[in-house]
Amino acid sequence: MKVPVSAPLALVAELTHRCPLHCVYCSNPLEMARREQELSTAAWTDVLRQASELGVLQIDFTGGEPLARPDLAELIRAARSSGLYASLITSGLPLDEKRLEELVHAGLDHLQLSFQDAYEESADEFAGAQAHAQKLRVAEWVKRHRIALTLNFVIHRRNLDRLEEMLELTEKIAPSRVEFAHVQYYGWAFANRERLLPTRQQLDRSLEILKRAEEKLRGRIRVEYVVPDYYAKYPKACMGGWGRKVLLITPTGEVLPCHAAKILPGMKFENVRAQPLRRIWEESESFQKFRGEEWMPEPCRSCDRRTQDFGGCRCQAFLLAGDAAATDPVCSLSPRRDLVDEILAEANSTPSVATSTNSEWLYRINP
Amino acid sequence: MAPVPASRPRLAPGCRMNEKSQQPRALLMPERALRLNGPSLEIVERCDGQHTVGQIIAELQKLYSKADPVKVEQDILGYLDLLQKERALDFE
């Protein structure tokens, strides 16, 4: 039975998988698209128009590193003339003042700059590249323009104890918004999970610090964070529910409900090269698969929270329980919560500040 | 700065309304979109760095003359407070 469908609000446009960083928790898939497989400028421009007609309000240009695309300014201009709000999710490499000016003139509304830590040495270790100093320069340049700036700190076991230093850096830069994003365990992060998952003690301390910061900075800097879901009582409403609010297009034009969905076995995802975006959103088998409540097992099916978290994350259910249609195992009501508890017990059995060398990490490769 | 009567709110960098031709009207900002209708649209349209909070209140009290003026004022201050929390406004 077809589930009634509303318009998506946001489109995540993964322009490329190419990236100068090699972050150990990258959300890109382990198998990446090569440059010659990427959608052309004309194809993206057409997709942006279709997305706007479908009801999309905002577009996130991301990657990989979207700056690796020489046509980025042209795509921002195309997004704006289609009536979309344009965000750039970037590492800040490679960027100089002149190119930033070009992007702002093209109509960029918002730039989100990723940070790996408060200090150069450890930040560059997690990024697998010398990047931190450049990010500080980029933040200063962005502040000279009338666009929104978000700092995005990716937090985990190995940097969570420096949260206060990250907040100090944030206050110094004074962006309009800061996100503290716990690593989510998909892709490269799943491979490095053991080294990334924080302890309960680290987490509790961090939540107190963030709550205080939120109050202190209110009206000046919007502070956003979420409890990492392995430690949560209930699962996250992943992407606001499968095929409900967000769609993602990969560098090669495949349309996905989220960053990680490609890992799900037996799923066929449609491509914008072959089908109109509206048809894919409204009618494709992949988008309908976990839309609505028909697919839900117990305990989700009769749970009051099913309209809030939509059964949690399908990719996490597959990664942890081996079944994409299972209740997300992070849910305390899931019959497989034991899988998560075991992982947490392991993470909490060793001290958080273990000495490690770079060779322990599995670094993201470049396609 | 807080939304006091003499301050002049204006949309913060990276916050703007969608085009007049786009329906429904919305206030767009990083990772958020607020739907605007009726009074919220009237308020946001006046967050232009020209109108003071006091002027916005007076104009909306006139526009919604059937409503209780005290309630109109409270609603406006509440909404400006929400927008400030979202970091969507600068007060000049």
Image (cartoon, coloured by chain):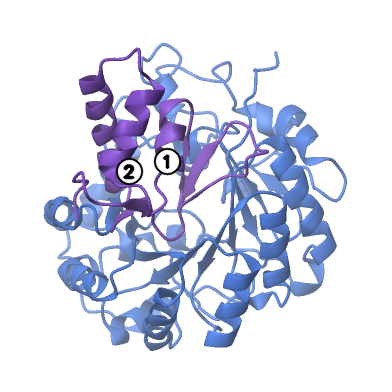
Chain colours: A blue, B purple
Viewer-side residue, A317 vs A18: A18
Give coordinates of residue A101: x percent, y percent: 57, 79
Give left or right: position of A285 versus A189: right
Disc 1 chain ID: B
Q: Quadrant of residue A67?
A: bottom right
Which chain letter goes with mark 2? Answer: B
Q: What residue is pinned by disc 2?
A: B83
Instruction: State which quarter of the image contains the C terminus of chain B.
Output: bottom left
Mark closer to the chain start, 1 or 2:
1
In the image, residue A177 sits, relative to residue A267, either above or below, namely below
Q: Residue at x 19, y 50 (%)?
A: B2
CB under 8 Å between discs 1 and 2: yes
**Residue A300 visible in the snapshot:** yes
Q: Hey, which quadrant is residue B32 in on the image? A: top left
Residue B69: horizontal and vertical position, in percent?
Answer: 25, 21
- On the same chain, marks 1 and 2? The answer is yes
Q: Nearer the viewer, residue B17 or A285?
A: B17
Residue at the disc numbered 1: B44
